[in-house]
Image: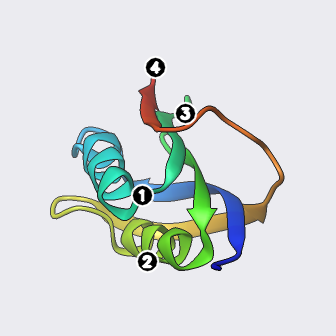
Amino acid sequence: MTAERCVRVVVRGRVQGVAFRAHTAEAARRAGVAGWVRNRGDGSVEALFAGPADAVEKMLAFVRRGPRFARVDAVEEHATSATDPPGFEIRY
């Protein structure tokens, strides 16, 4: 059985206005990761990934590079024990 992991991330760079949230949600659904993604007022994107450790690692790798038109300058990772409902959503 794969260990579960939950991580909150803040992604900085050119990450708003480049469909970062939509691509992240699509990747999370494909990976079988629960959680959410949202834009923050400071221009960064914040997300929560919860699921099997290997799937969460895939999501961390995804946000480190971002979608095609994004430029990721930094990713802050924070382990958390937050529990969200199943599924992945874009928050506004």
**Residue 32 visible here:** yes
User: Pointers 2 and 3 in contact (CB under 8 A)?
Assistant: no
Residue 60 vs residue 5, the one in the foreground: 5
Q: Which residue is mark 1?
A: 32
Sequence-earlier tag: 1 or 2: 1
Q: Is residue 89 above or below residue 30?
A: above
Horizontal side of 35 relative to 5 (left or right) equals left
Name the front one of labels 1 and 3: 1
Q: Report, in whole angstroms, how far the alpha carbon at label 3 lies from the one at label 4.
A: 9 Å
Q: Is residue 33 above or below residue 52?
A: above
Q: Quadrant of residue 72?
A: bottom left
> Residue 30's spot in the image, x, y percent?
29, 58
Sequence-earlier tag: 1 or 3: 1
Give the crowd class for mark 3: few <14, some 14-19, many >=20 residues within 10 Å: few
Q: Which residue is mark 4?
A: 92
Residue 14 vs residue 52, the one in the foreground: 52
Sequence-earlier tag: 3 or 4: 3
Q: Secondary structure at mark 3?
A: loop
Q: Which mark is residue 40?
A: 3
Q: Amino acid at mark 2?
A: Ala
Q: Which residue is mark 2?
A: 61
> Residue 78's spot in the image, x, y percent?
76, 62
Horizontal side of 4 relative to 37 (left or right) equals right
